[in-house]
Image (cartoon, helix red, strand yellow):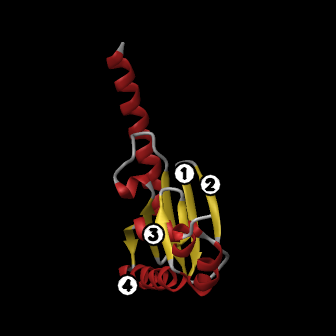
Amino acid sequence: MFERWLEALREVGAERMAMANHVINELCRRAVAVVLFGSRARGDNTPLSDWDLLAIVPTGEYRVEVVSIGQVVWLPLDKLDDVLETSMIILDAVFDGKILCGDEDVFMMVKRRASGYVEEKGLVRTRAGWFRRDMLNSNP
């Protein structure tokens, strides 16, 4: 019985990998860079974990799109500063991120800007998210 469950898990995992490859290939054709983040980038995923992808594009609207394998976060470079002010998911994507395709220099520039933002705002990453350092150190 256990073997049947393992075989089913392998089949589902293989199907999800094929779908992920299709989505990633499409994104690589459309974006300047595509970055894997979340549990799969950190290495603490399971075979059924979703795929978190960051698609860096020159212009457009920042949005989070739900796709068959997980989510795609669209980051327009021309709105990077605004997105850093309003979306903590970008920080997770950048700090966990592993580039899958595209211009690594662009991703490194985004990473530098995000690091500067974190330093400027005094942010600290915890298991619960990003918080200002002074808020974590205060005793209510």
Name which of mark 3 and mark 1 comes first in the sequence.
3
On screen, residue 27 versus residue 82, left or right, reads left
Question: Considering the numbered disc 4 on the image, is that residue within a helix, a strand or a loop?
Answer: helix
**Residue identified by numbered label 2:** 66
Say which residue appears at 32% left-offset and 18% top-offset: 3
Task: Count neighbours of disc 3 (C-alpha within 10 A) and say few if under 14, some if 14 to 19, many if 20 or more.
Answer: many
Quarter where residue 138 is shown: bottom right
Say which residue appears at 63% left-offset and 79% top-offset: 85
Q: Which mark is residue 70?
A: 1
Task: Count neighbours of disc 4 (C-alpha within 10 A) and say few if under 14, some if 14 to 19, many if 20 or more.
Answer: few
Q: CA distance from mark 2 to mark 1?
A: 6 Å
Check the picture and name the quadrant holding the C terminus. bottom right
Q: Are marks 2 and 1 in contact (CB under 8 Å)?
A: yes
Q: Is residue 30 visible?
A: no
Q: CA distance from mark 4 to mark 2?
A: 27 Å
Looking at the image, is 59 positioned above or below residue 7?
below
Q: CA distance from mark 2 to mark 3?
A: 16 Å
Residue type pointed to by label 2: Val
State the image coordinates of residue 1 (x, y, percent, origin top left).
36, 12
Q: CA distance from mark 3 to mark 1?
A: 14 Å
Quarter where residue 35 is shown: bottom left
Q: Are marks 4 and 2 in contact (CB under 8 Å)?
A: no
On screen, residue 32 versus residue 76, left or right, reads left
**Residue identified by numbered label 4:** 105
Question: Considering the numbered disc 1 on the image, is that residue within a helix, a strand or a loop?
Answer: strand
Residue type pointed to by label 1: Gly
